[in-house]
Image (cartoon, helix red, strand yellow):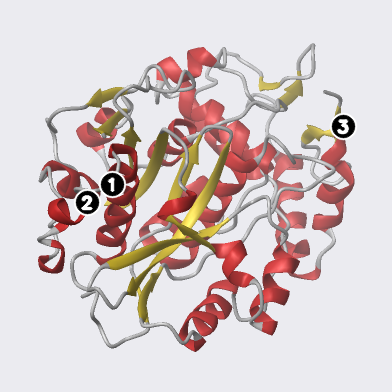
Amino acid sequence: MDFSTCPICNFSIPSPELERHVDEHFSDEDYARDFEFAQQIARTPPTLPRINSSFGGDARITEGVGNTCDEKHASLFRSQSKESFYKVEGGLMTMLRKCLELESENSTSILSGHVDHFQSTDSWDAGWGCGWRNIQMLSSHLIAQRKEAREVLYGGCGFVPSIGSLQRWLELAWEKGFDTPGADDFDQKIYGKRNWIGTTECAAILRSFGLRARIVDFSSRDFELASSAPHLGSDTAKLSQVYGPMDTFLSTGKLDLLPTVSSANQRHSSISSKDKGHQMLTECGWNYFSGNNVSKSSDRRVVLSEKAPLYFQHDGHSRTIVGIQAKHQKNGKQQYNLLIFDPAEKTGALVRSFRENVGWQKLIKRGVHTLKKPQYQLCFIEPGIAHGEELEELKILHSTRHEF
């Protein structure tokens, strides 16, 4: 891939992104910050690391004496670019909430707070960039909703970086020792490349800032772990460690975390093992977003959760789960719909469907019957920031695997 140097900030970026990147410098709200960054870069002593394009198109930070990870962190903080996206007045999640409240069905929906939608663009990342777009969606929530995350993510810049900048942050995470086996899969280089990424790369980036990102696998017994993440340590029969609400739910070995689901095993006795597994995935989503504090029979149509969205991975694609809906059926059972933001969808189409209250269900809702894959992975983020020994432990990625 060809690279070009931005005439404003001297940042080396893929040529297809150059025009969009330069335009961002001249938006009114960002001009002052970008001009200050440009001045900082101009004043940077030559002994600090500089961003150069290496042979073959991979832009790497030049190695040298005193070139520590901290220096690279500072250099990347100055040179990273902000991702441009369709900004929805009032927020896309507000529009979704209003549509859910207008539904005539007897249901309860739980939503994350603020989440921006980042769509893949036909001219740049369509077909390979969904993983990066989902990281951007998660980041938009963390920056807007969690003060402790906003202060550390991407150097505390306060914005969602571009794909190129995220690729640099991932390389730096690898260099710091996060997910070393995964780094080896990519030969420690990903900047400027169009490789697919997944939950492990998402977790590695977020963990490098101290965020407690965890991975859960749902996999059929006759299906081997995806080759894209062969290095993940997994617990299949029992959990050796319980980290949070996802793992607590799985560690019970049953579906009755909430009192109203006590007959779940009997209820599922007539369906296939795969359907049971997919039902468990949706029940797990409910318990995650509800935090065991929201009853399925709640009179409130829409409830806001403090939980971050979920990175939702399966073979060939990934999406972001921004909430979940439980429909209360006449037979007393619950029908679940995952509420998702798909990078493959156009933000403008979502806005129109919400505004007109027509067709948005097909773009957002995913029921158990739509889950056809033999394996799914979720990446979720627990509150707080890890330090010291805990941060060192986060360098090794483990997944909790549930077989069905």
x and y percent of residue 197 in the render?
56, 31
Q: Earlier in the sequence, mark 3 or mark 1?
A: 3
Quadrant, the N terminus = top right
Q: Residue at x 48, y 32 (%)?
A: 201
Which residue is disc 1 drawn over? 271
Contact, mark 1 vs mark 2 (Cβ under 8 Å): yes
Q: Nearer the viewer, residue 207 or 320?
A: 320
Give the residue displayed 37% in from the left and 23% down from the top: 223
Pick the front one: 20 or 344: 344
Q: Which residue is mark 2?
A: 268
Q: Quadrant of the C terminus?
A: top left
Amino acid of disc 3: Ser
The amino acid pointed to by label 1 is Ile
Crowd class of label 1 (few under 14; some 14 to 19; many from 20; radius 10 Å)? few
Q: Is residue 16 left or right of residue 32?
A: right
Q: Which residue is mark 3?
A: 4
Find the distance from the CA under tag 1 to the CA under tag 2. 6 Å
Residue neighbourhood size for the residue with mark 3, other residues' Cα within 10 Å, grouped as few (<14), some (14–19), many (≥20): some
| Label 3, label 2: how far apart the Cα atoms are | 57 Å
- Say which element carries label 1: loop
Residue 128: x and y in percent read 68, 34
Instruction: Please name whichever residue, 112 or 279, is drawn nearer the observer in this view of the structure.
Output: 279
**Quadrant assignment, res 219:** top left
